[in-house]
Amino acid sequence: MATTDSREPSVVLVTCPTCDHSVPQNRGSRRIICPKCGNFYDRDSAVDELRQIRRVNREKRTSNEIKDRDEDKDKSGGTLSSIANFFQNLGPSRKVKPAASQPRSDSQTSSHLSESSSKGSNTELPPINHSQTPSGKQTPSYNVNGPLSPRAADKEKSAGKGDNQRVNTWAQQGDTHISQITASTNNNKLVYPVRTKTAEQLKEDVLLAKECGNWKVVQDFYATTFESFLEINATFKRDPSKEYKTIEEPGLKFELVHIVFEVLQKLPQEIQKVVLKSVINSLLKDKRPHTKDDLRAYLVLLQNPQFENFSTYVIFAHLLRQVAALTDHDHHFLVHWMKGLKKQVFQKIIKRLQNFISIRLFPPKPQDLPPMVKCTWWIPSATKVLALFNAANNLTSPTTVQYTDFYNPMLDHLDLMAEYYTWQNPSSCAGFSFCQYPFILSINAKRTILQRDSEQQMIIMARRSLVAKVQRRQMPDVGMLFLNLTVRRSHLVSDSLNEIARKQHDLKKKLKVTFAGEPGLDMGGLTKEWFLLLVRQIFHSDYGMFTHDKRASVHWFSSAQCESYQEFNLVGVLMGLAVYNSIILDIHFPPCCFKKLLSPAVVPYNNPQAMVGVTTMSIEDLKTVQPDVAKGLQDLLEYDGDVEDDFGLSFQVSVTEFGVMKTIDLKPNGSNIPVNNDNRKEYVQLYVDWILNKSIYHQFQAFYHGFHSVCASNALIMLRPQEVEMLVCGNPILDMNELRKVTTYDGYSPQDQVVKNFWEVVLSLSNELQKRLLLFTTGSDRIPVGGMAEMTFKITRVGGTDLLPMSHTCFNMLVLPAYKNKKTMKLKLIHAIQNAEGFGLE
């Protein structure tokens, strides 16, 4: 539809009837596809116009056919290089024989097609028209869109063809595994073409084709298989007579799909081009409303390895657009069917989609792809399809692939804050944002967004402090720009609590710590030491706030009731400050703790009574907290005997608090309800919920609000629980060879024997001692999220071989004497790192 005025301007405004997106275009030209959503403006007129374009192109090709064929062979992309231009025509790939033409005999047709195939010039699909059967009778072609119309059925009936089926037989040299095609008109029930080709038979056909040089049988199979969604289902559906309308069973021969595509990659370019043309035909057919067969066909086409080549991206984009535009109901089926894909296939599709997004964003050869302004719907479509695979991956336990496989590191080079603001302000910045699909953003990208968002909040808080100073006519000072904490080592916890309570409004400022009575200037080292010492004291078993399970090697909240939960709030504030100030903490919480920390990810606004930190827990979560208790509950679930008589349990749980045994009902009147074979699942679920949610609710509530008082940001919505753990605790996997690559030297050089001895000693140490060395020199035993490359590490020379190694944690500096031999160095180094504590300034 176009908007014009009486003066008929040369430029008109064209509006898409699907998404209402308007674009200007010159009068007289006709736009076919919307650049925003990829849908057709006017399908009928578009097809008519494109047929006219192809007719003109055929006339032009007549005089230059041989020349064009030679030029195509010389191009770097082979025959696939013209696929992008071909798809722009968006028309049927078959050439229909004029009605006046006389049909060829079987031998003539076979000879003609074999000759064309051997020359490599015939890349069109073989025509399906009225041809001769071996008996000499003519058979009609079939309609891939469904049953014949009543009028057509009457014609066939009068012609002696029968009223229940139509039969199409290839006129060419026979592929014996392509059987008859039938469609029933009774009750509008579609009867699929019979396709019995097996993987072994396909491999035999390929071997014979290589020996004789005639690829016609193989080409016919591939051309037919992908020419319509009906044919795709006929070939790959396990039992065409079944509908397979459940989410558990797609009914596909996945092994055959794998073999067909594996063989396709090794076939001649002419056959590969024929397949792409057939795929185009399939995508062009109108399939609304969509059936389960269409969903099966989409699932098959997404596995096509041809879409790894960017010369096929125009076709791939249209496939992705159609999949992305499916209804939520159809997506629900697809997601569950995707779970059935093998890990290798699953990974390949994810990589294919990631490469598609990366190349569209940063094309190595921009001229080989359509301009970005004409295909803005490409990336959103691909990302939405990738989201379906991410959803399928999350439904499996354990997951098919790691969640990090969905990261696209190329997105780290985008303007991430622009993406974030677009996501946060949809009214003023309407458009697609990768933040809508956070699974695709790497932990580095999310950390960048979180830190920059925190910096903006820090600036706002500092600006407010400055305005308040000016309003009170006080002299501004540098200290007002920071969260300054002054604590005594002897009263570390109480002083920290008091300081944080007094300065709640400054928590979003940059943190600086001063130890009372010590002359240290905080350049980062004092802050790190404050975190380490405070965490070490709070998490000590004698302090009573947390319990420690030796088997799981994690801390958990003590269920003992307290008069005040302020100290749990302090731990939450510590974790938030660590994230805000890029400090890594040596805290060992189980994964479910971070899941609770994001439940919800945004604190309910102005509602202190809202439930927070409560989420659905399973026995798998309990295994990470109390593995022995979880094993007992698992044994109860799997017990074959009489649970009530043999266990004698009721819906109660017993706990010990300060040496006193207490019994608590898991449900009303739980003491009088025995646990039996019928209700044991309920008992286990209530038990798990009590340990991980109810018994520690007030403790975790204070912890939750402490963390969010510092880190409250919509950016948290994008984070997974595992990613929050990484941001707080860092990466525990060490690689000292990577640390060696980023090390600088003062007084030494990498070629000095002392330096070589040092690294030989370090690499020979156990993982525990390597962590102690890292803690000794940097103040943390873990590495940043981005790896060792984000660290700075310096080795400085000092005289006196009798001295122990020393460190300056604020500079990540190791002061190393020039020990004479490796044995002495190892003894001195181990002695230093095992007996170091405190900043050491007196």
Image (cartoon, rainbow, N blue to C red):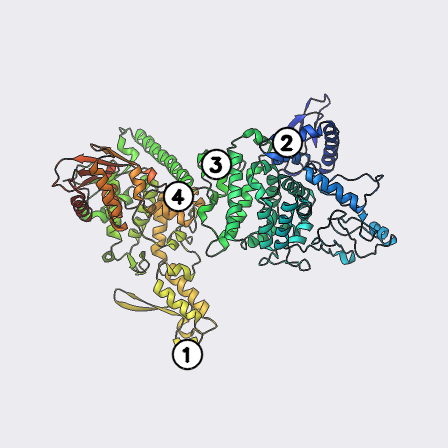
Secondary structure at badge 2 equals helix
Amino acid carrying mark 4 in the image? Ala
As measured in the structure, the alpha-carbon distance from the residue carrying label 2 to the one carrying label 4 is 59 Å
Q: Is residue 666 visible?
A: no
In front: label 2 or label 3: 2
Q: Earlier in the sequence, mark 3 or mark 4?
A: 3
As measured in the structure, the alpha-carbon distance from the residue carrying label 2 to the one carrying label 1 is 82 Å
Q: Quadrant of the C terminus?
A: top left
Secondary structure at badge 3 equals helix
Location of residue 752 (image quadrant): top left
Residue for badge 3:
419
Q: Are marks 1 and 4 in contact (CB under 8 Å)?
A: no
Query: Percent position (x, y) of residue 485?
Result: 25, 40
Furthest residue in direction front, as rendered: 211
Secondary structure at badge 1 equals helix
Task: Give the crowd class for mark 2: few <14, some 14-19, many >=20 residues within 10 Å.
Answer: some
Tell me, for residue 712, which label it has, or none.
Answer: 4
Amino acid carrying mark 1 in the image? Asp
Query: Percent position (x, y) of residue 212?
Result: 66, 45
Residue for badge 1:
645
Is 335 on the left or on the right of 280, as rendered?
left
As measured in the structure, the alpha-carbon distance from the residue carrying label 3 to the one carrying label 1 is 61 Å
Residue for badge 2:
72
Q: Residue at x 51, y 31 (%)?
A: 364
Residue toward you, 652 or 775? 775
